[in-house]
Image (spheres, rainbow, N blue to C red):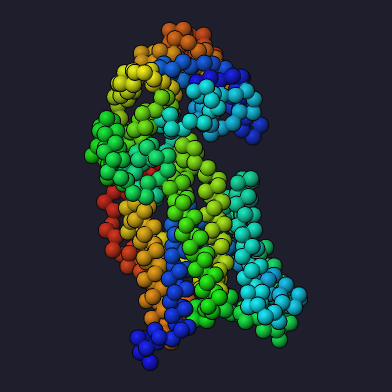
Amino acid sequence: MHFHSVSVRFSEAPVLEDVSFDLEAGRFLAIVGPNGGGKSTLIKVALGLVTPVKGHAALFGDRAGAHPERVGYVPQIKTFDRTFPATALELVTTGLRGSWPARVTQEEREHGLGALRRVGAEALADRQLARLSGGELQRAYLARALVRRPDIVLLDEPATGVDFLVEHDLYDLLEEYQAETQGAAGPATIAMITHDMAAARYHADLVLVLNRRLMAYGPPEEALESESLREAFGHRQHQHAVAL
Amino acid sequence: MTLLDALSLPFLQRALVAGVLIAVGTGLLGVFVVQRRLSFLGDGLAHAAFGGMGIGAFVIVTTGLVGSGLAVLRDPIWIAVPFSLLAAAGIYLMRRRTDLSSDTAIGVSFAVTVALGVMFFSLIPPDVNLGVSLMDLLFGSILGVRALDLYVILGVTLLAAGLTAAYWGKLAYATFDEELARADGVDTARAELVLYLLAALVIAVSAVVVGIILMAAYLVIPAATARLLARTLSQMTALTVVIGIVATLLGLAASFLLDVPSGSTIVLVQALMFSLAAMSRRPRREPLRSS
């Protein structure tokens, strides 16, 4: 993933300013920063959903959004229509097809069940999405992201407000997936927005601190050092973050 | 005359075929209209068809086409269809390029097109016979369907079925979650435009048969009924079409036997089926979870 001097504005309000960084394949990146700091926007730029007003973003050496089949995306806020009649397996199948299935084939069902099994949610396959809890939904979305065996997984605060998915499980799953994809193409890249500084410190091998501008980028022990967090969060929240 | 005897009457055969075709066309699109909370779109586009018919009728009268030997040239539908497509494109652009919500964009189009329709119809001398009356336009005349209408409806239904089949997966994905669909490379703007234009086309050619006032019912009630019964969107799509066809056949039969207007009888049968579906649902043990 390559960001070169990326700036984004929404209705003239700056959301990202001059953000540049390179993320090599196979790394585990934690993106941290205060609310409104542009973390979700950064992920959306990488997905090609938001076009920068300045600079450019690239994925796999091509423009962002050019290879959706190589990206697994787990959104933060479930913006889906809760009245939409759908099962968890149909949602997972969109990860295989890139469109909504009129009928799930036997092969897709097997792949989908495998992905749901991996996240401990096989029993949810034929359940209505509207009846799932936040944690169960998160598992279904994670299965949807992983079922296509992506080269990069982008997760937007996947553990926020979750009542079922223990964050520890999530990190284990992601690390397991990375280990599994060691091969000719190399391990998958993970980029995840999180508020959990302790988890970022423990699991990620790179941390990006963002507050509209890139405040710090590097190994956790460097990026999470006191001064960059103080700048990003302000003093009071920084004390809280350091305590974690 | 019994119902079986009546089935041999050409006008009733045409009515049955037209009703079934309209149930298929509106049903396929109605699923997305209901799921996208665009129920007002049916009303808006039906009234755009009314505006187009008014302009078309005025053009036919003032240019002397009313006396043309070609039946198709005497029919205001050839102006109503492109006018409705323009209205649909206008609603789409208003929604995409401004912060206005769908119902506001549709409301603006609704008011403007009705005003145009009323104005142009008022400019036509009352003694001119257009072959289609204002009452037919407002309340429908399914028993008055001509062979030409039938061919137009058949062509439009086939086009709608073909394009809906081609775009179903993308439209469904974008209806479920537009951002997720876009992240997967779906051109959600194009899918939405296809939906709006197809709805305009189907509604414009169906409005004379079903009536402008009842058109929205065809687009909304069968899909809403199917939503109460279906577990998946593909089930909902199939059920919507079946419910639309059954309501049309039962409604036409009831209207013949009771000697009451056919359009309103069909809509009342649709409403009855909706009520039965709503009553057949078991009360939820747990509420839908909020996001």
Residue beneath the point at 34% across and 33% down: A147
Residue beneath the point at 69% across and 79% down: B68
Q: Position of residue B101 (x, y in %)?
A: 58, 50
Residue B185 visible in rendering: yes
Residue B111 visible in rendering: no
Q: Position of residue B115 (x, y in %)?
A: 68, 67
Quarter of the image with the N terminus of chain B is bottom left
**In the rendered image, the vertical position of residue B253 relative to residue B272, given as above or below:** below
In the rendered view, does A66 fall on the left or right side of B288? right
Q: Position of residue A183 (x, y in %)?
A: 34, 18
Quarter of the image with the C terminus of chain B is top left
Q: Position of residue B259 (x, y in %)?
A: 43, 87
Which residue ends up furthest to the bottom in the rendered image? B1
**In terms of depth relative to the viewer, which is nearer, B155 or A135?**
B155
**In the rendered image, the vertical position of residue B64 relative to residue B27, given as above or below:** below
Residue beneath the point at 27% across and 30% down: A118
